[in-house]
Amino acid sequence: MHRSRLSTFVIDCKVDDLAPAAEFWSKALNRTLAPAKPDAPDYRALGAVEGAPTLVIQRVEHDSRIHLDIECDDLEAEVARLEQLGATRLRKVKYWWLMQAPTGHVFCVTDRRRPLAGKPDTNEWP
């Protein structure tokens, strides 16, 4: 058995400078803007809200869009489950899989960043 849930909405921004984009989304969504991390210049996190998905601003080369992340406690089991539903693996990135749904939507599957057990928004899979 493994667990998974919607984890994160990632706002992909095709921009040269991520700071103004992060400022915009911070103010638009009324969430604080986490400090930039020198080891992750293409990412900015917005302040967490208990029980809500994480929001991340990401600088990208492709067209701007929003994608979602699914977090799980068994990466390979969750990726295999999604493949059985028709998703395909595109490539492994750091500690997550970039995947594509049968509908063409790109999303990520990542190992857990927050506790999953006992949370009402967590799914349990055989």
Image: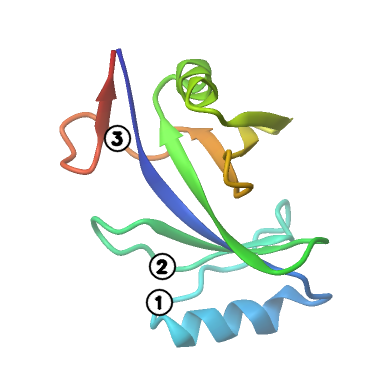
Mark 1 or 3 closer to N-term? 1
Q: Is residue 104 above or below residue 17?
A: above
Report the residue at 74% width, 60% height from top.
Answer: 41
Cα separation between marks 2 and 3: 18 Å
Horizontal relation, residue 61 to residue 68: left or right: right
Task: Name the amino acid, label 2.
Answer: Gly
Percent coordinates x, y for residue 71 in the rendering: 43, 37
Q: Is residue 97 above or below residue 54?
A: above
- Mark 3 Cα shell of 10 Å, populated few (<14), some (14-19), many (≥20): few
Mark 2 or 3 closer to N-term? 2
Cα separation between marks 1 and 2: 5 Å
Percent coordinates x, y for residue 40 in the rendering: 70, 54
Which image quadrant: the N terminus?
A: top left
Q: Quadrant of residue 63?
A: bottom right
Horizontal relation, residue 81 to residue 121: left or right: right
Q: Is residue 64 above or below residue 82?
A: below
Report the residue at 42% width, 57% height from top.
Answer: 54
SS of the residue under disc 2: loop
Q: Is residue 69 above or below residue 89?
A: below
**The disc label shown at residue 31, or none:** 1
Percent coordinates x, y for residue 55 in the rendering: 47, 62
Cβ atoms under marks 2 and 3 closer than 8 Å? no
Which image quadrant: the C terminus?
A: top left
Task: Name the amino acid, label 3.
Answer: Pro
Cα separation between marks 1 and 3: 22 Å
Q: Which residue is mark 3?
A: 115
The one nearer the camera, 93 or 32, is: 93
Cβ atoms under marks 1 and 2 closer than 8 Å? yes
Q: Which residue is mark 2?
A: 47
